[in-house]
Amino acid sequence: MKQRDFENRYRDSWDQLEAWLRADSNKAETAVLDLPAAYRSLCQQLAMAKERQYTNRLIDHLNQLVMSAHHRVYRQETLRRKGWLHYLLAGFPQAVRANSRAVILASALFLLPGLILGIGTYNNDALVYAVMSPEQVMGFESMYDPGNRVLGRERDSDTDLFMFGFYIKNNIGIAFRTFAGGVLFGLGSIFFLVFNGIYIGAAFGHITRVGFVSTFYPFVIGHGAFELTAIVLAGAAGLILGRSLVDPGQHRRTVALRLASVEAMKIMYGTFLMLVIAAFLEAFWSSSSSTPIALKLGVGTALWLLVFAYFILAGRKEGAASAS
Amino acid sequence: MLDTTYNVETPEGIDLRARAAGPVPRILAYAVDVFYRSLILAAIGLALLFAGVAGIGIWLVCAFLLEWFYPVFFEVLRRGQTPGKKAFGLMVVNDNLTPVSWGASFVRNLLRFADFMPFAYATGVISMALGRHFQRLGDLAAGTLVVYREEEKAPVALPDSTPLPPPQNLQQADQQALVSLLERHDDLSEARQRELANLLEPMTRKRDNEALAYLRSVGSWLLGGRG
């Protein structure tokens, strides 16, 4: 068959498919089209055109059409059979438990430097200045000085909203970087975990040493339940990425990295949510100076228990059911 | 072969072809996106100027969302194209040339930070240079690829010429050469086309316009035209 006859025979179906692909946005007027069938016959025509060595112009045109139809046919729809609620109730804690080695390692990388610096600064007046500049320490002290009538600065709801924005941008940014650094053979995650551990540990130790306990602990205990665990989890997700490059197992490194990123993202979605909750608590609950200290400590403790109970217990029943 | 073509065989047995985009157009596209993002942030900033301290808080949230999720939004909902990529005809696809999904887009944009290290996307550029398909680390982890979006070309109108039967002994390659000469009549200057036609003088025994017209007629016959 000559090319011109070939074109004439199929031009109508190509035009129809093209029009259908273009008119997707306003669905009302879209003509009915059996996309898979149209796509398959188009593929056959492209193969024929190549085999018969028709001109490049025709082959390019068909190739392009096949590409756009391919995009439509193979669009990846996430199977929302289980959905978000299931992820929150079971999927997230299950993913954390399934990667318990990474989580434990990340916790150690965060807590051990924190503990060492905490004890160090508690016992040694000068050590805190190895971590922070004197101005930072001053600002820090004045924020939690019980002599101040209000916590931190004089705050009204406007400032609360400001602080919320600040925590969102700053803290979630830190967590995302902690995760992203993991792809550099885990080094970035390790750095951020240790660095944050040192910084936070020094702050804890120093504030305890100067005796601002009654303001500092009620402030941090509430959102800390979400924020500190989220930082550790982001680090753990990063370590999963790093591990896949250091020890890819039976796969090639690129494949291992791909598989690991799917696993790590299961943790990251939940971590993101925890950080939003933490920012919310930190801005609107932890900072309120009218709430009695006992209540804050009580709620804070309850939140810590809740977070741990969630990760240890949630989704267990279903995991056992699907395993059996 | 040393080129940027990326081939994927689909389940239908068709080889899909795409061209992977290198660092330069991607950096330019990124610059355009940075520009748009700053513009949006400035506009939001102006609008929130009257909201006082709370306005700064909202602005910070917007800055956060733009920093991390601006590309995700466009890549998933606008067929793989942020405004910058659109300006340079690029698009993000999964490495089987299907449209990029939420999960993959999140991964490649969260890992942007690692590609940025230690400064100015040095890691990302090195990763692009080492890999075969210009993938930065985020692309490798997400299994994505930045390719050129082929623009729809208007079908070329062929010049009018009465089809003439070709000489008997025309090989396949010769036929293709004649047809492409016909197809490219817009891309090549008339003078160059005449020059090419003159090369065949020993065969056609014609020169200049006459030769060109004859070759076009033969080409049009080969495409299936009949007088």
Image (cartoon, coloured by chain):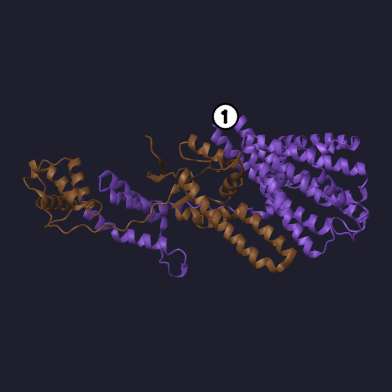
Chain colours: A purple, B brown
- Residue A82: x and y in percent read 64, 53
Name, please, the residue furthest toward the left. B205
Give the camera-side residue of B6 and B227: B6
Does B79 sit left or right of A156 as displayed?
A: left
Exactly how many numbered labels are in the figure? 1
On screen, A155 above or below B21? below
Disc 1 marks which amino acid?
Gln
Q: Which residue, given by chain and number where applicable, does mark 1 sit on?
A: A250
- Residue A178: x and y in percent read 68, 42
Does A288 sit left or right of B157 as displayed?
A: right
- Residue B191: x and y in percent read 17, 50
- Residue A103 falls in image quadrant: top right
| Residue ID at (66%, 44%) | A177
Crowding around mark 1 (Cα neighbors within 10 Å: few <14, some 14 to 19, many 20+) is few
| Residue ID at (54%, 51%) | B101
Q: Secondary structure at mark 1?
A: loop
User: In which quadrant is the N terminus of chain B drawn?
Assistant: top left
- Residue A320 falls in image quadrant: top right
Give the camera-side residue of B28 and A314: B28
Does B180 sit left or right of B11 as displayed?
A: left
User: In which quadrant is the C terminus of chain B drawn?
Assistant: bottom left
Q: Is residue A227 visible?
A: yes
Q: Is residue B93 visible?
A: no
- Residue A102 falls in image quadrant: top right
On screen, A49 above or below B140? below
Letter of the chain that mark 1 sits on in the rendering: A
- Residue B113: x and y in percent read 61, 44
Does A244 sit left or right of A195 as displayed?
A: left
Give the camera-side residue of B135 and A72: B135
